[in-house]
Amino acid sequence: MKLVPQLVIIAAIVAVATPLAARFVPATHPLLDRAGLLAPLAALGVVPAAEGEAQAAGGAPAGRGPGGGGGGAVQVIASEARMLAQNDIIEAIGSARGAQAVDLSFGVPGRITALNVAPGARVAAGDVIAELDAQTAGLLVERAELVLADAQRTIDRLSQLAGSGTTTTLQRQDAELALRTAELGLRSAQRDLEDHRLTAPIAGYVGLIEAQVGDLVTTTTTITRIEDRSTLILDFRVPERIAAQISPGAMVQASPISDPAARINGQIIAVDNRVDEASRTLRVQASIANTDDRLRAGMAFRISLEFRGAEVPSVSPLAIQWGADGAFVWVVRAAKAARLPVRILQRNADAVLIEADLQPGDLVVTDGVQALRPGADVALAAPRS
C-alpha cells in the first residue's frame, strides 16, 4: 500500500520538472522531442512555438543567445585547426648491462695465496686480481732455463768444432732440435707460471669475491666479475609493427624504474634480424652514458621511442565535446554552427590530434560551446587575454 503514495509523488515531481526543464534548459529539447512532449509543451506556451517547430523539424532554435534567450547570434571564440605531426610513442621495459663484462677464473688449479683487490674497486687492464701458490711453477721455469742454457752450450761447442771436421751434420741437427725443444719448454713453463696470477683483461669495477686466501680452486671456479659500466647497454623488445621504422642510430630516452624523474638520452646500437614468433616482438639494444657511475648493471629501465608520423589536424582540448555517439567539435561555417564528429588520434598537453571532415575555412569553437545548436547564428568574439 505504501507504493501508491510514492508513485504519486514521483509523478508529481516529473510533471513539475518537465515544463521547467523545457523552459529553462534548451539542451533537453531533443530528448523531449523524441519523447513526443516538445510539441504539446510548445502548444501550451511553455516553449515558444517557433522553437518547438524547429526542434521537431530537426533544426535549431533561431536567434538563441548564450543564455538560451532570444535575440542575436551566439558569441564564441574560435580558430582554425593547426596541422601537427602525429607522433607514435613506444614504451618498453629493459634491463641494463655493462658495455663489457668478464667472469674471471684461474687458468690452472691451485691454492689462493693473495687477493689484491677489494669488491667494488676500479681496476685497469692488466692489474693483478689474485695469485695462486706458484712455487712448483717457479721451479719448473728454473729447470727449463737450465735445459735451454745446456742446449745453447751444445750448439756453441759444435759450432767451434765444425771447422775441424770433427762434427757431423746429424749431430748439428740433433743439437738444434734440442735447443728448439728447450726454448718451447721454457715458454710453456713461463706461461704456466703466469696462469698462477689472475689479471684484469679490461678496465672496470670488481664484483663480489667469494673465494678467500687459502681456498683451493679449479679452472671452473669463478673468482669475481669485472664490468665496465661507463656505458650501459639496454636490452629490450618492441612490437613488430614498428620493425620497419627502427634502426641503429635512432634516439631513445631511458628512465630508471627506481628514479622515474631521471631522463637519460641514448641511441639504438643494434637491432635483431628477426621477430620472435612467440611474442611477436623485436629485440633491440640501446646504449646510454653512465659517466657519473650512478647506474648499475642489472637495473630495470623504462625506454621511450618516438616516431614522427603524418600531419593531422589538432585542436585545443577545450574544443572536444562528448555526446551519445562519441566525441565531436563545434565548427563555424558561413557564420553558422555545425556539429562535427571527430576521432581522437592522440592527446598532448596542449593539443588533441583528431581525424575529422574539416573543410577549408572551418573555425573550431573553443569557448561558448554550451550555447550552440546546429545551424545557430554565430558571432566571433576576440580571444580572452
Image (spheres, rainbow, N blue to C red):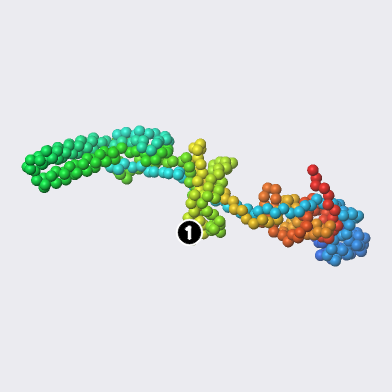
Write down the quadrant of residue 34 in the picture: bottom right
Spot occupied by residue 18 in the image (x, y as percentages of width and height): 85, 58
> Looking at the picture, how far across and down is residue 221, in whole percent?
33, 43
For disc 1, the neighbor class at 10 Å (few under 14, some 14 to 19, many from 20) is few
95 or 143, nearer to the observer: 143
* Percent x, y of residue 181: 19, 44
Looking at the image, is 271 positioned above or below residue 37? above
On the picture, is 194 further left or further right than 123?
left
Please state, as top left, top right, bottom left or bottom right, where the N terminus lies in the image. bottom right
Task: Identify the amino acid type marked 1.
Answer: Arg
Task: Report how many numbered discs are placed on residues in the image.
Answer: 1
The C terminus appears in which quarter of the rendering? top right
Which residue: 88% across, 64% down?
53
Q: Residue at x 89, y 54 (%)?
A: 72
Q: Can residue 233 be seen in this view?
A: yes
Which residue is pictured at 74% across the width and 54% down the height?
81
Q: In the rendered image, which quarter is residue 138 located in?
A: top left
- Residue at the (87%, 63%) spot, across then down: 54
Instruction: Tell me where residue 364 appears, x and y as whole percent.
Output: 77, 54
Q: With respect to residue 145, does 44 lie above or below?
A: below
Q: Is mark 1 on a helix, strand or loop?
A: strand
| Quadrant position of residue 338 | bottom right
Q: 96 or 353, which is in the foreground?
A: 353
Label 1 sits on residue: 274
Q: Is residue 7 visible?
A: no
